[in-house]
Structures are given as structure tokens and as C-alpha cells.
Image (cartoon, grey):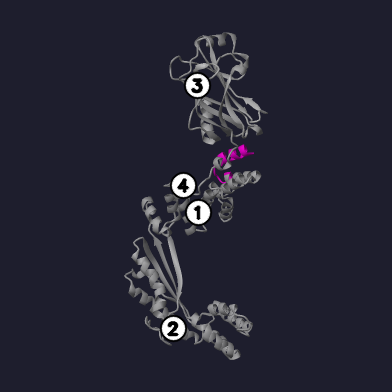
Amino acid sequence: MNNRYFLIVVLSACMSAAVAQTSILLTGEKSGSDTRVKVSNYQVGHVGDQTMVALDFVLDSLNVPSNRFRAFTPIIKTKDGAHEQRMKTLLVTGRTQEIIFEREGIDPLYADNCVKVRREKGEPQTYKYTDAVESQPWHDGADVYVECDLCGCADRLKSDMAYITSLLPPDPYELVEYVEAVPTYAKKERSLHGSAYITFVVDKWEMKPDYMDNRREIRKITDTLDVMVADPNITVREIKIHGWASPESPYKHNEMLANNRAKSLTEYVKSLYNLPANVFAPAEATPENWIGLRAAVEEMDEQTLPHKQEILTIINKVLADLDKNVTNQADRDEHSIRSKYPEEYRYLLKEVYPGLRRSDYEISFNFHDFSVSQAKEIFKTKPYQLSLREMWDVANTYEQYSPEYNQVIQTAVNVYPDEPEALINLANVAMHQKDLLKAETLLQRAGKSAEADQARGVLAMLKGNYDEAEQLLNAAASKGLDVSKNLEVLKQLR
């Protein structure tokens, strides 16, 4: 690759540049109308520690007599004229003049820094010009001109000056590279938990759906299952029911009641659906809900429950015994509360014990896998059915940082608020939108991956914390991520 082509590639890919969509016609007001040259495709800006100029000199209408030349010199100049820097001159020569330059040397005004091209008489001809000089602080905001020596007399007083554009300071938001965090493929297994307060006839375990508020409580389970069974994108994997009883009866009796009531509820739910039998896990039960009793007592104040601490001591003893599978002490300890603190016991029996008799349920299920086209349709109405990777695939069907892309990335965080990849990608969107506070908040929870370090490094760079940015980018590089472009940008910003 030759150097000139390499500079054009770098200039187009890396720099913060002023780019023209139209062309500028350089005409020889002092030298005649046959000295017209068009400047097009011009780009000026910073690349690393250099200021670069790239443009096309279109010579189609330029007439250069055989024994003459035309000179075109880009110049960087501050608006107040205090600073000026000449760049490489393009000399366009006639055939005889080219021979003279080779024999006698180039005019001293241009000899130190120029490039020659011979005008192909009457033929379309374009010269792609590039040059770079060491960046100076005064370059930012300076104007770029082309000095046109259209008489070929090497007299700057007779030259025309054509304004091209102005140099802009590098925009870090345009220069930095935002690296996406690619989610892995994962099984879309989910579970829902809840509690139903089913009422059974005293000392009975037959499931009566119309007894007391049972119809309403059963709907907590069936309303969820109805939706899942009706959705072709969902497979119900397992349904677990765990029964709890309150401690006021003998432990063995409670054990029998709790187990049978859990089985009765499981069989009832099973009868409502045409699901494989193995979907329903064997019913489980805890004979006495001392855990729930302790939680309720801990929430009370001494005014509500005067002997709160003494009662908690007894409850903790029961739980310690049950942890050791010592069940024969539970009845005595429960009786101890009743006999020592009768008023408190009556309060607990009325206000707390009913809530201890409950049936916990857990429904495990998974969503089907979708192709990208299917996922795009699902996203419109049920984005929660998509995995994080499927959302990422949908996002990347749109132009990066377009409104559609940004919407998908934001939804991914809404559905998966604790997934580092989702947080990193939304932080990239926020930085691209110059919302650094949002990006910083997201990246606080984004983990310690190379992509997270890279994103934090970019954030530090955008905030002007260059030392911190360098440390973070190097940390990302040590984890195997290519951060060379952002390190180059960091060098340029410094």
C-alpha cells in the first residue's frame, strides 16, 4: 500500500473532519478564465498528533501552456492572521516546464515541499491530494484555504486565495469506538412463585373449591397456568405445591393434615389441565409454620405483643430443635407460649395463625427458541418471551444507534435489569446520546468483563479523565479485548 493511499484510508476512517458534499471552483480572477480548477471531496481534521488535509483537485478545465505551471497550496490560517502554516504544494506543469524543472530545479518558493504532476492536455484529470503536519493548539478553529498561483509566476501577491473550510476540534463522541457486549445463548427457563390461602374444613383435607374464599385463592394458580397453557410459545415444565400448617394442634396431627392437604390441592389442580403427569412434582409440606410465626412476631412492637422477646426465645428454640429433626418438643413449647402468655397467644391465634396456613406454589416453564424474524414479531407484543441474546439479535437488524436499535436495547434492560451485557449495551447508547450520567449509573452494575472495562474507559475519556481512561482500557486489553482504536483516540485527545 503506498503512503498516499494509506493516509486517505486513515483520514476517512479515523478523523474528526469537516467534509464537503459540494465542490469549490477555483477561478483565476487575476489570471484569466482558462485557469479553472475544482476542489471536491475535501476532508480536514486531526488524526493522532497530526492535522491532515485530503481533497481532490479536478483539473479537467485547467489549461496549462507547455512552458508554464500552476501551483496550488493548502494553507492553515487563524482568523486573525496571527498564525499561518503552508502545506505541500501541488505543481501542475506543462510538458516543456516539466523538463525545465528537471534540468534547472523547481522554483525556490515551492521547492522544499511540493509534488509535481504533468497536465494531460485536453484529458479529464484528477489529482488526489493528501498532506499532514504536526498538530498545533492554534489549528482548532483555524480556516483552511488553497492558495492558487494561476499565473505560474511564483509571486504570492498575484495569487488567489480560496476558502475551503474550517478545522474543528476533535469530537470524542464521534471518535471513540463503542464495543457491544454480546450475550451468550442461554436456556430461557423461568419460574413464578406465589401463595394461595386455601381453607379446609377443620381436621379435613378434602379440597372444596367453593368453600370460603377458595375459588378466589385457587385462581392465583389457575389464572397463571391458563395463560401459559394457551400460549404456544410456552412449555410448562414443573408445578410444585408446598403446604404449611399452623402450630396449634399436635405436631403429628399437623404433619398428617399438611401432607394430605398439599396432595389434595395438587390433585385438584392436576385435574383441571391436560398436562403430562410428570409435570406435577410430588406434593410437599411443612407440618408447622414456625418460620412464618417468627417473622410475624419480629415485625410486632412490645405494645402489640408485650412479651415479644420471651415468645421469640421459645420460637427460636423450636426452630433449632426442628433443624435437628427433634419434633417431639414442638408441642410442649407451643403449649408453653399458650400457658405463660395467654393473652398474647389468643392474639396470635386470631391475627397471625390463619396466615400461616398457606399453600406455596412454584410454576417452572420455558419459552421456545425463536429465529430472528420470529423474534422481531414477538418483540412487538411479548418481549419478555425473548432471551437476552434474541433481543440483541433483533437490535442488530437495525442500524446501530437508530431509534429502533435503541428501543430494543432499552427494553432488554427493562426485561433483564441485572444482566451485565444488557447494561453495557445500554450504556453505549447513553454515551452515544451524550447522556453520561445515565451511562455511569448503568456501568456501576455492569460487572468486571473486558467489555465493561472498555465502556468505563470510554466514559472516562468522554469526561476528560484521561489517566483513568488509559488504566481502564489497558485493563480491558489485558483481558483479551482489542482496544487499539480507543487508545489511539485517547492519544489524539491528549
For the residues bearing labels 1 and 3, Cβ distance under 8 angstroms: no
Q: Residue 21 versus residue 312: which sits nearer the camera?
A: 21
Give the alpha-carbon distance from disc 4 to disc 2, as whole Å.
60 Å
Instruction: Give the number of the disc on residue 402.
Output: 4
Q: Earlier in the sequence, mark 4 or mark 2?
A: 2
Vertical arrangement, residue 346 with respect to residue 37, above or below: below
Look at the image and tell me whether residue 423 can be seen. yes
Disc 1 vs disc 4: which is toward the camera?
Answer: 4
**In the structure shown, which secondary structural element does the residue marked by tag 4 occupy?**
loop
Disc 1 vs disc 3: which is toward the camera?
Answer: 3
State the image coordinates of residue 228 (x, y, percent, origin top left).
37, 66
Query: Quick one: label 1, few (<14), some, or many (20+) residues within 10 Å?
Result: many
Q: Earlier in the sequence, mark 1 or mark 3?
A: 3
Vertical arrangement, residue 465 with respect to residue 91, above or below: below
In the image, what residue type sits under mark 2? Leu
Instruction: Give the number of the disc on residue 83.
Output: none
Vertical arrangement, residue 95 with respect to residue 245, above or below: above
Vertical arrangement, residue 230 with respect to residue 377, above or below: below
Mark 3, residue position: 37
Query: Quick one: label 2, few (<14), some, or many (20+) residues within 10 Å?
Result: many
* Region rendered in magenta: 477-494
Disc 4 vs disc 2: which is toward the camera?
Answer: 4
Q: To which quarter of the image does residue 102 belong?
A: top right
Give the alpha-carbon distance from disc 3 to disc 4, as whole Å.
39 Å
101 left or right, relative to 187 = right
In the image, what residue type sits under mark 1? Ala
